[in-house]
Image (cartoon, rainbow, N blue to C red):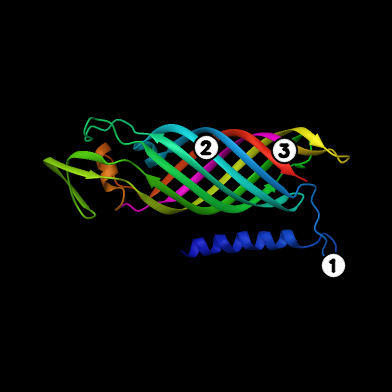
Amino acid sequence: MVRYKKLGLVLGAVAMLALLPAKADAQFIRYSPIFWSFDVNAGVALPMGDLGDVSKAGVAIAGGAAYFLNPRLALVVKGGADFLKGDSGSAFDGGEGPDLTVIHYTAGIEGHLADPTGEFTAAINVGVGGASFDTDLFAVDDLDCSGTVCSPSTGARTTSTFSQTYFAAQGGLTLGYNFARQGTNNIPVVTFFIAGNVHLIFADSDDTKVLAGGYGVSPFDSMFEIPITVGLRFNIP
C-alpha cells in the first residue's frame, strides 16, 4: 500500500509541475496547440508470465481521451477490453480452459517526446486503475475446493468462474504519424499510431487457485499483459 501512495504522489507532483507557467507571469495563461484528443485502437493482447500459463493471445480493443496541460504533457484516461483464449489444460472438463475477458480502465499522464504537432509523434504514458476478469462457468476434474482451500482428489470435480477485479498499473509507448491538418497553423486533427502497453495486475493467489489448478500450475498473485494495437487519434485544437 505504501508503494501505491508513493506512485500517486509522484503522478500528482508531475501534474502540478505541468500547470506551472514557463515564465513567472502574474497570470498563468494556458496554451497548447491541441486541447483534447480522443483515440480508438485495436490489435492483439499478449498474456505474459503466469497469465500466459492459463490463456493464449487474443483480440484487444481500446479507447481513450487526453486533455493537454501544455504542448508536451496531458492528462489521460484509457479503457479497453482484451479477449484471451483458453489454453489446453489436462484437468479441465473437455481439456480446454475457459476464455478470459479482461476489462482495463486507468487514469494517468502522457508525456510527448516529440512535438505532437510535427509530422511524427512519440509519447510515453503511465497510469493506475483497475482490471476486471470474467469467464464462463468451467469445471476442473480431480480437484476438490472448499472456500480458498484446494487439494488434488481423484474423481472430484470443482465448478467455478473467475470473475474478479484488481488494482492495476499501466505504462506504454505510442508512435504516430499526423496525416490530416487544418487551419492557418496547420494543426494535426488526425493521427495514425501504433501503441504498445504493459499492464501489471495485482491479483490474489486465493482467487486463482481453481483456474491455476486446471492447468497444473501454482496459484499466482500478479499478472502481466501486453496489448499491441494500431489506431486513430482525433485531435481538437
184 sits to left or right of 167:
right
- Which circle, 1 or 3, is nearer the viewer? 1
- Sequence-wise, the earlier of marks 1 and 3 is 1
Residue 219 screen position, x and y as percent: 30, 47
Q: Amino acid at mark 3?
A: Thr
Q: Secondary structure at mark 2?
A: strand
Q: Amino acid at mark 1?
A: Gln
Q: Which residue is mark 2?
A: 61
- Sequence-wise, the earlier of marks 2 and 1 is 1
177 sits to left or right of 126:
right
- Image position of 14 with respect to 140: above or below: below
Question: Residue at 50% across / 61% down in the picture?
Answer: 3
Q: Secondary structure at mark 3?
A: strand
4 sits to left or right of 39:
left
Q: Which residue is mark 3?
A: 121
Residue 56 screen position, x and y as percent: 39, 32
